[in-house]
Amino acid sequence: MDQITRKSLLYKSNLGFWCINHVQGCSHGCRYPCYAWMMAHSRGRVETYSDWCRPALVSNSEELLSNELRRMRVRPETIHLCLTTDPFMYSYPEVTALTLRLTEMINSFGIRCSTLTKGIMPVELADPERFPGNNIHGISLVSLDEEFRKKWEPGAAPYHDRIGALRELHEYGCRTLVHIEPYPTPNIITQSLRKLLESVDFADEIWLGGWNYNDLAKKYPGYKEFYEEQSAILNRFLAARKTP
Ligand code: SF4
């Protein structure tokens, strides 16, 4: 696997939370398109889409993060992994191993981690002695249709495996989250949000967001009403879970 070095790792994102990205690029190669790929391309960090899909590990991540955490006067409650790459990149054990070491380091400073992946969450995260940070683990999931995944998230983990790994963490008592974004309109794929929700019923949190990366969703007549309807379905589903 390629390696690069960086001058810093930990930063506060424009979204207002702290995060780290210890890999450049992402083999999942999402075609919505991926916002991180567009930014990396426009800033000249990566030339082509195939370069983007060949990830490079930030080899000095541990050294950088350790120094940055030590220097912080006010430590944040949570650090997010990751905004511009995937922390559990499918079929890249080197990425998963580094993510686990960095998570362990962050937890050792009394800081919780939140993670979001389209890969496979490793079961090691359920070990409270190694990861005492009450971390929250999330998957990104917008469909259950493998043909959709192959077209739009070609390098990401199959949905069944992605859900199964998160479910296992839930069964071990970890806090879990599902991020349904960018949810496609019916001109992209016809599917049932209800079925998707039922497949992740165990998750502590479920979030829904629209397909905002290109104009495809807006081409669907009544797309605003469609998203209002999907939000109502989610709200009813979450309300029903609370009712004993
Ligand atoms: S998983 Fe995330 S970072 Fe990776 S290509 Fe897809 S959207 Fe981009």
Image: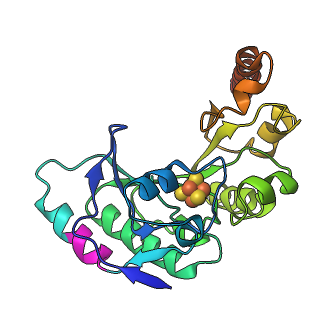
Position in image of residue 103 (x %, y %): 40, 66
Q: Main secondary structure of the magenta part?
A: helix
The magenta segment is: 60-66
Magenta stretch holds residue 65: yes
Q: Is residue 18 left or right of residue 3?
A: left
Q: Nearer the viewer, residue 115 or 220?
A: 220
State the image quarter where residue 167 is shown: bottom right
Residue drawn 73% across and 53% down? 152
Position in image of residue 214 (x %, y %): 63, 37
Instruction: Say how many tags the image has.
Output: 0
Color theme of the render: rainbow
Position in image of residue 23 (x %, y %): 43, 69
State the image quarter where residue 118 is shown: bottom right
Residue drawn 24% across and 77% down? 63
Q: Is residue 186 left or right of residue 137?
A: right
Residue drawn 30% across and 46% down? 77
Which quadrant contains ligand 1?
A: bottom right
> Can you see residue 244?
no
Q: Is residue 137 above or below residue 60?
A: above
Position in image of residue 126 (x %, y %): 55, 65
